Image (spheres, coloured by chain):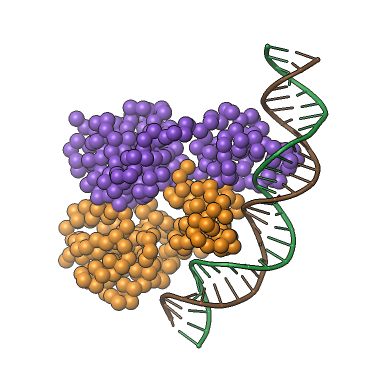
Chain colours: A orange, B purple, C green, D brown
Amino acid sequence: MTIRIVLADDHRMLRDALVNMLSAETDLDVVAVAGDGPSTFDLVREHAPDVLIVDVGMPEMNGVEVAQRVHTHFPKTRILALSGYTDKRFVQEMFKAGAAGYVTKAAAASDLPRAVREVARGKLYLCPGVTGSIVADLLPTSSGSPPPLSVLTAREREVLRMLADGERSLAIAESMSISLATVEVHRRNIMRKLDLHTIAELTKYAIREGLSSV
Amino acid sequence: MTIRIVLADDHRMLRDALVNMLSAETDLDVVAVAGDGPSTFDLVREHAPDVLIVDVGMPEMNGVEVAQRVHTHFPKTRILALSGYTDKRFVQEMFKAGAAGYVTKAAAASDLPRAVREVARGKLYLCPGVTGSIVADLLPTSSGSPPPLSVLTAREREVLRMLADGERSLAIAESMSISLATVEVHRRNIMRKLDLHTIAELTKYAIREGLSSV
DNA sequence: GTGACTCTACCGGTTTACCGGTAGTCACCC
DNA sequence: GGGTGACTACCGGTAAACCGGTAGAGTCAC
């Protein structure tokens, strides 16, 4: 009994490598691959896969949105989330959006076929690295990993990048054709969402997230 | 003739999948894998690989720092950067840090073995997505390397470190038992000596010089 | 329609950073 | 002795960041 899979991740290298690995499993068949949300939706419609593996952090239309729409329109397709983050907010969001499984990129690659088989069988799957996050709600979030970049909107990310590149607010305002006050609003939102307090902290966050270079 | 590789990426799933794929090539041998900067450096020292594949966006000690250190201490190991970004600044930073190749995660997975072979042969490699205007920009930079940390006095270095750690001037004054005005003097001296203009730039300088972590 | 979110913009006010300069003391070197 | 740099501290003033709040318009899901 072959499990038919659609795989969605914006990083082609990871896609290719995972397809290569999944295809080596005799009971798994990757019928389509997608690099963004909209084409993921289209391919699910076209192929009606048993399992959709979807990257949580895809740009534009992210994994949560994809999962919501696929779950609504194609409830028979089981959704397995693939994520760079163990943060429980993302786990909860994906399950709320209709996912049946959650695997992080910190997991061993060999966990993926197992996760696929579990969700295809109608079970819920959480990879070992995130079970604690969900079960132990008592853990303080301050000791967890920093918020992901995807909590920021596109405009906020742009402001973040430019601040971290050493630009002043007035220059950013001119560059983005907005008022200084709006830059300030974005900067506040960034600081609040990411719990940062100085430009030095902000700069480091941007560097860590790959948004700005050292 | 086997090319010996160390692969460094904080996402284990990608690591596993890429190792799986590279190992299928008869002339490639992944001798070690690392998930962070410091252990990457240790493994390079231990294994003396022909090629280090390093993810640019690793947390804490990122790919640029890893490349700089590996290039300085193990110049025979060729460095191939693996990155989620095609932005030319990342490319420039990695080449400046000593990398011989740059492959983005948007590239096909099949590009990776080819890139490895090219850099192992002593050639420079740029994956197709970032050639073009990048090459022109890789011409020798008119600006020289930044001033060394040794142009700063001990007190100035202390102020630099604390600013880069996200402390405010008043807190630094209290911590060092000096007046706010003196902190200001030190900050000015730092900016002048290093030709920096914003705290973001200062933070990055401190990170590059190993005075503050990301 | 309603609520939430995003983007835009503003107010008044405070705090901090920044910048031109000043200067004293000390240690070191010529 | 004189010059220089480091460390300390200050002046008056400006620029920028920061912070409490306000609000309208557009979009989208419910």
> Residue A204 versus residue A141: which sits nearer the camera?
A204
Specify the quadrant of the image occupied by residue A125.
Answer: bottom left
Q: Nearer the viewer, residue A27 or A147?
A: A147
Residue D20 left/right relative to B91: right
x then y, percent, for residue A183: 55, 60
Q: In the rendered image of this protein, does residue A9 appear above or below residue B29? A: below
Image position, residue A4 (x, y; %):
21, 65
x 19%, y 53%: residue:
A24
> Which of A15 and B178 lies nearest the eye of the viewer?
B178
Q: Is residue B31 left or right of residue A146?
A: left
User: At 19% from the left edge and 56% from the top edge, which residue is drawn?
Assistant: A23
- On the picture, is A34 further left or further right than B202? left
Residue A22 is situated, as x and y percent measured from the top left of the image, at: 23, 56
Residue at the spot 57% in from the left edge and 35% down from the top edge: B194
Question: In this rendering, is residue A63 above or below B198?
Answer: below
Q: Residue at x 60, y 46 (%)?
A: B166
Task: Name the quadrant containing residue B51.
Answer: top left
Residue A34 visible: yes
Q: Is residue D3 above or below residue B180?
A: above
Q: How many marks?
A: 0
Q: Which quarter of the image is occupied by the N terminus of chain A?
A: bottom left
